[in-house]
Amino acid sequence: MANLVAPQPGPEGFPRAVALPPDKLEAAHRELVERFGPGRVLTDFRDRMAYAYDATGEKYPPDAVVFPLSTEDVADAVRIAARHGLPVIARGGGTNISGGTIPVTGGLCLAMNRMDRILAIDTENHTATVQPGLRNLALQEALRPHGFFFAPDPSSHRVSTVGGNAGENAGGPHCLKYGVTVNHVLGLTVVLADGEVVRLGGPEQDRPGYDLVSLLVGSEGTLGVITELVVRILPLPPVVRTLLAIFDDLEVAMQTVSDIIAARVVPATMELLDRGTIEVVERYARAGYPEDAEAVLLIEVDGPEESVADELARVEAVCRRNGVRELRVAKTEAEREALWLGRRAAYGAAGRLSAHVWTQDVTVPRDRLVEMLRTVQAIGRKYGIRLINVAHAGDGNLHPLVAYDPQDADEIRRMKAADQEILAACVALGGSISGEHGIGIDKLPNLELQLGPDLLGLMWSVRQAFDPALRLNPGKAVAAPRRNV
Amino acid sequence: MANLVAPQPGPEGFPRAVALPPDKLEAAHRELVERFGPGRVLTDFRDRMAYAYDATGEKYPPDAVVFPLSTEDVADAVRIAARHGLPVIARGGGTNISGGTIPVTGGLCLAMNRMDRILAIDTENHTATVQPGLRNLALQEALRPHGFFFAPDPSSHRVSTVGGNAGENAGGPHCLKYGVTVNHVLGLTVVLADGEVVRLGGPEQDRPGYDLVSLLVGSEGTLGVITELVVRILPLPPVVRTLLAIFDDLEVAMQTVSDIIAARVVPATMELLDRGTIEVVERYARAGYPEDAEAVLLIEVDGPEESVADELARVEAVCRRNGVRELRVAKTEAEREALWLGRRAAYGAAGRLSAHVWTQDVTVPRDRLVEMLRTVQAIGRKYGIRLINVAHAGDGNLHPLVAYDPQDADEIRRMKAADQEILAACVALGGSISGEHGIGIDKLPNLELQLGPDLLGLMWSVRQAFDPALRLNPGKAVAAPRRNV
């Protein structure tokens, strides 16, 4: 729970944040302004505060903000930061909810938003080459006239950037069928901790030597700063059909998810909303979901017309065999949008319940999802917290949304206890404490619970190999194992 | 060209192979026999020679061979090797053709073939858990009754193992549609250089912390020894249709490959054979390919019946529009096998041309494949070597097959020169000097040509992070950059 966990950079092997003495900070600012001009450097405290937080909630201002326009800019900024002993934090849309872009130890924030160009769209080889600050939705909009799309579709796609999607290895509803971001990044240009520029991978499937592309994706800027990406693009499916299946029983809804996959259909999405979510969504967004349903599944199938018709028929047959209360198939794009409204409104509707919403992100094997969901509901009741659940059910990826009042110390205490129980239950079910939102500062204290000290130590040694001085995004992604400190 | 390049472990940062003095070797053998029993240790020179080579041709005997049955066996063997200063080389089927399993510095060979069990087939979650010594074909045969398959299908699938496929990040004809091995490995159990056991990844899509699974896949046993794999399994496509397209013009054949992909069809395979290959194949295997054709494409589409029919029609339309000479669509499984016969016979038929065959493995962007193929043909003529070409055309992955006489020093010299020109041409076209056969000892001297010293240095530091003493499969996969030595 990021907004509750104070970052503790010391114990994990990072130099504790020490503000630079004013004269040294002044010298760093001066060198940055000399190199980039005053228009591309922020040094004023109030300006820097705008880069102190992301969607997670914590606030730690950077010592300076630079807006690079090119790989060379980034390399120079990294070198200047090194000379002045400043950590380096690359930042895209700042939409992540694990604290991956919060400058917990201060440092130089590289605001990548102006590096937002599409350098090439290669429909022949099914790739696009883009700068990291390009927004996910802007890429989708540029690809659509060519008949292509970029598969990762995090809910933040209007704001989040392709570089940020790669940094956090973002998912989204469609990753059930298409996989997460790492499956769609083919090549990277990266500025390393010492300012060296390397190109990793490329349009080919095979990567000679070690697969550093996959290592960089999801590393939250701790191994290098991504300055260019070659991503896989996919032909838009000719046909998309969307269906809402309404169930009187949560177990039956989840069994239906499994039965659909057992029937050899891999829908593009299978989103599940539990009763609490339906009630809240209906109260605030009026999507037309029946408030007394125990669960709804939002299922989308896509592909060529013939196979979509066949798959939709098989999905409907499985739902009926399992005793679905009602099936609604969208006949128009407007109807499709209406069906999605409830799912999309969940986060906002939860926000109406209290001042803040905390989104947890856990994944369990698909056949344990009901158990996990029941456990989360029970934990919520036990601690008396307001908790609703949405899930990328096909992936076993559950997002409990917790509405809370940050002024209520007792509620915070109960939330923290509930959160820790949720993570422990997830690990006990063979799950992963991070589904698609990354580790950041939020999951870092629990990473050893997930990985154990040996594996964490191995990751730590990889980090040290890339960044011996530990200046790239300190306090995120991977920590030193406690037993070795 | 592995059988021509003498391994030079010294300059790349590895301890040069020094045979253990007889008394020390004796002590190592004694400890291995004590732990594993005489039936699971080979120490006799003639026995060890059977593990001195792989399909590449070089021969360097290991100091001992052990047959582990479990992760614990591997961990103990690795610890014993460490105590006696022996390198460790894990070996599966020994089918690789880049020298990845040749003990060039001696050491302890871990023959993984007896770790060949299927531990679980989970049709619910679409995963299988297997030991690394399981043969690829044995896995396919076990999956078929469940209606599933494992996508990587290297030509060596009858002999090569799943662990070896992962170690080399193997491809195969079907990786056009399904991706290479790294896309199908979800979790690994790995014994590290010091004998520690770690579990990486698992059935979930997201991997908290760094993605070490993808890093291990393709690392040729240099970062750890894989002792268990969780792999993705896919539902068998209900329908497979196979088509042979015969062309009078190589450029037209390759344009057809691009046009098919531009027509939004992603066939399961698009294999190309050039005229030289067709002639050789017909002379020795009589697959019924017309000997005067300039190229044939072997195209397979798979999926649900409705979409396959549609895709096949679109493939045929593109071929006709491009002026294909003849289309042959298999109507029965026997006809399908007959069409594949020519492709499968290429390597064997090339073997009839001379005593040995060397297979090169280069990948270029798909739209440069014709250029690459013409260049290779011209290089072959320039040096007067016998060279035929098969390609996974959809991937831009080209396999020049060179038939040669290992006794003919002049031919060897010309081959070496031709090979170096082929690799340089590949890099110049923006390609990769290894498509799917790995780096091993064969490509190691040219890896810096591909990656440059900075990137190679980065990979080297990752290797050192995993294995500071450089005892895991020395002389393979990644070398120290020369400029740093």
Image (cartoon, coloured by chain):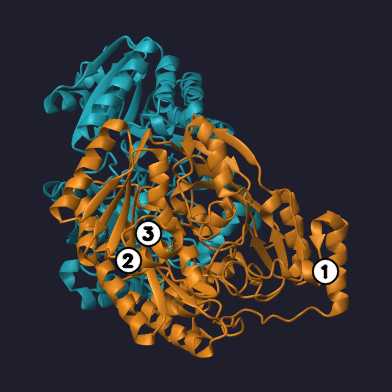
Chain colours: A orange, B cyan
State the residue position of label 3.
B205
State the residue position of label 1.
A44
Location of residue B20 (image quadrant): bottom left
Q: Are marks 1 and 3 on the same chain?
A: no
Give residue A388's position: percent from left, percent from top. Answer: 39, 71
Nearest to the eye among marks 1 and 3: give it.
1
Q: What's the residue type where badge 1 is placed?
A: Asp
Q: What's the residue type where badge 3 is placed?
A: Gln
CA separation in Å, label 2 and label 3: 23 Å
Mark 1 or mark 2, earlier in chain? 1
State the residue position of label 2.
A274
Q: Are marks 1 and 2 on the same chain?
A: yes
Q: Is residue A163 left or right of residue B144?
A: right
The residue shown at (30%, 59%) is A296
Location of residue A421 (image quadrant): bottom left
B267, B440: nearer the viewer: B267
Q: Chain of mark 1?
A: A
Helix, strand or loop status at disc 2 = strand
Mark 1 neighbour density, 10 Å: few (under 14) some (14–19) many (20 or more)? few
CA separation in Å, label 1 and label 2: 46 Å
- Asked whether the beta carbons under mark 1 and mark 3 sit within 8 Å of each other, the answer is no
Q: What's the residue type where badge 2 is placed?
A: Asp
Question: Is residue A386 depicted above or below A241 in this figure?
Answer: below
Helix, strand or loop status at disc 1 = loop
Q: Which mark is residue B193?
A: none
- Asked whether the beta carbons under mark 1 and mark 2 sit within 8 Å of each other, the answer is no
Q: Is residue A42 left or right of residue A341?
A: right
A330, B292: nearer the viewer: A330
The residue shown at (19%, 44%) is A314
Q: Does residue B244 show up? A: yes
